[in-house]
Structures are given as structure tokens and as C-alpha cells.
Amino acid sequence: MSKFARIALIAGLGAMTAACGGGGLLNRDRPDEFAVQRQAPLVVPPDFNLVPPQPGAPRPSEGSAASQTLEALFGGPQARSSVETSMLERAGAAAPGIRSAVGDPATATVAKGSVTRDIIAAPEGDGASAAAVIPG
């Protein structure tokens, strides 16, 4: 083999090896393969008098991946039982500003003790250093 052929072979092998690394000059943005959602199959609508969809509107035959997961796991919305309906009727409607009043420091609450106060006042963390302590 000539000297030129050896150099060309080494340069070619080096370029192919560099292409496998994914870094450097050949690095480019790629789509996230786990964020891809399957498209629903096309179906013929039963009503041919439909209006065209609005540009950018979500397709009505499919939902988000989260709603499809909930549908698969729990089977969609279910009718309320008589006990649940009775309980909701007895509870009545909530006051319109209840969510604002709950977080207000002037709202009167029941004292639950120092443990609950310590839990609520604890800084948020990732739980990596969490430990359970059983007083004895």
C-alpha cells in the first residue's frame, strides 16, 4: 500500500469513528423519541356536514398522552354512587373565595401540635437525606 492510501484509510477510519461519538462538529439537535405521540387512525365521520377544523386546534379523535393513560388505567368517567351523591348534596356548595381564604395567615385553624407545624415549616427537598425516626 502506498503512503497516500494509508493516510486516506486512517483519515477515513478516524472520520467514521468521530461520527459515532455524537459530539464535536457532527452534533445536532434531535427530537426526543420518548415525547413522540402516535397519531390516531383516520376514520370516516358519520356526519358529512361537519365544518373544517380550526388551524392549530387539537384533533377531536385523540387526547393527550396523559388522558389516554388515565382512560386505559381507570376506564374513563364513572357514574357516582348513591352514597357519593348523597354526601355531596349534604356538603353543599363551597364558598366562592374558599381557596383564597385557606392560604390567608389570618384564617383561624385548629392547633395540631408541634409535629404538624414542623412538617409544614420544613424546607422542600428531594428526599435523598430523609430518615424515619420512631420516638421510643
Image (tube, grey):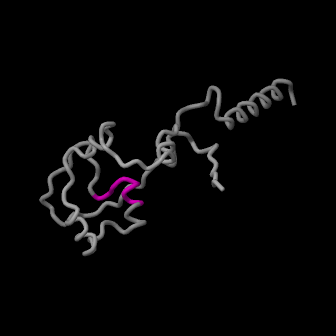
Q: Quadrant of residue 2?
A: top right
Figure label count? 0
Q: Quadrant of residue 126?
A: top right
- Measured along the vertical axis of the image, is residue 114 above or below residue 18? below
Q: Residue at x 33, y 36 (%)?
A: 105
Which one is in front, 69 or 131?
131
Residue 99 in the magenta stretch? The answer is no
Q: Which residues are magenta?
A: 61-69
Q: Residue furthest bottom?
A: 82
68 within the magenta span: yes
Please tell me which residue lies in front, 98 or 35: 98
The front one of 131 and 63 is 131
Residue 34 in percent (x, y) is at 51, 49
Q: Quadrant of residue 78?
A: bottom left
Could you tell whether 59 is left or right of 71 in the image?
A: left
Q: Quadrant of the N terminus?
A: top right
* Residue at screen point 21% across, 63% down: 45
User: Which quadrant, please, contains the C terminus?
Assistant: bottom right
Left or right: residue 4 versus residue 105 is: right
Report the residue at 27% width, 74% height from top.
83
